[in-house]
Image: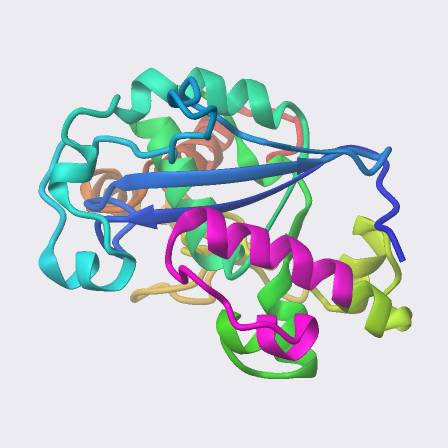
Amino acid sequence: MPLQLKKPLVFFDLETTGLNFISDRIIEIAMLKLTPENVTTQLELYPKNNMGEPIRNFINPGISIPPASSNIHKIYDKDVVNMPKFKDVAPKIIEFMGDADLAGFNCIHFDIPMLQEAFLANDFEIDLTQRNFVDVQKIFHAKEPRNLAAAFKFYCNEELKDAHSAKADNDATYEILLKQIDKYKEIGNDVDTIIKATKQGHDSIDLDRKMKWDDKKNIVFNFGKYKDQSVKEIFKKDKSYYDWLMGANFCLETKEKFKKIYNKIYSNQQQKLF
């Protein structure tokens, strides 16, 4: 059965130089947008080639791709050295996304934080946490714990060709979700119902999961010497810890949220934080 959407849903997948949100960079991005009318379009950052075929959405990371990463996704420095940098293509990506919700395979713990960090590092003020996330991996792990290739084989009865190319992985993710909502009728076929049925609600404040809500809906630290203690109360009694956090090697999105909490405390702001 088709997905029932109130707004567009963008499936996306990244290939990167590594797994560190702060120091690694995006080298390829694929996006497929599904509208409420069930029309799909692919993100094409560059004009088609002479044969009328789409060019892969490679991005110059500005750093060398480690051999260990290239061994996985088969993307090498020579493939990206003459491509635009992220800051040059970010406006096209933002325009393509619009206000769409986001979907992917393991996107909550990797692709979304990586994309958010890339936007902020290049001075694009966009907050991805204001959107719904549908992580196809969470549905899969809840029902049939395995990886993307196994999921594609299980749900679509096909071998996943060109695994670890962003487009192949992304297209497979889209096909898997369609099969999942058809197989598991109980999870529904709209974003809100899927999220609720598979417990995909945002359980952290920031994408790098340095903060979370406790049982009383207080914002608490999720790491370090003040783990499980109120961020607000710690900032009140230990301002030096805030200074340390802002100088530490944390994601920009996390630091921005630390700053919002700190500023609210000392400016007596009344509006809701997150």
In the rendered image, the vertical position of residue 257 relative to residue 147, given as above or below: above
In which quarter of the view is residue 242 placed?
A: top left
Name the spot of residue 154 as percent of width and height, x first: 64, 79
Residue 31 vs residue 188: left or right? left
Q: Which residues are magenta?
A: 152-179
Q: Is residue 205 visible?
A: yes
Q: Nearer the viewer, residue 72 or 160?
A: 160
Residue at 53% from the left image edge and 31% from the top image edge: 127
Vertical comparison of 255 with 85: above or below: below
Which quadrant of the figure contains the N terminus? bottom right
Assign the C terminus to one quadrant of the image.
top right
On the picture, is 52 further left or further right than 2?
Answer: left
Residue in the picture at 19% in, 56% down: 70
Q: Is residue 167 magenta?
A: yes
Residue occupying the far front of the picture: 51
Residue at left offset 83%, top offset 73%: 183
- Looking at the picture, tell me which residue is in the foreground, 206 or 157: 157
Looking at the image, is 14 positioned above or below residue 217? above
Q: Number of labelled discs?
A: 0
Q: Nearer the viewer, residue 160 or 31?
A: 160
Left or right of 152 in this view: 116: left
Residue at image coords 90%, 70%: 185
Prevailing SS of the magenta stretch = helix
Q: Is 109 on the left or on the right of 191, as rendered?
A: left
The image position of residue 90, as x and y in percent, is 40, 22
* Residue 204 placement (x, y as % from top left): 55, 55
- Return the residue nearer the eye: 203 or 86: 86
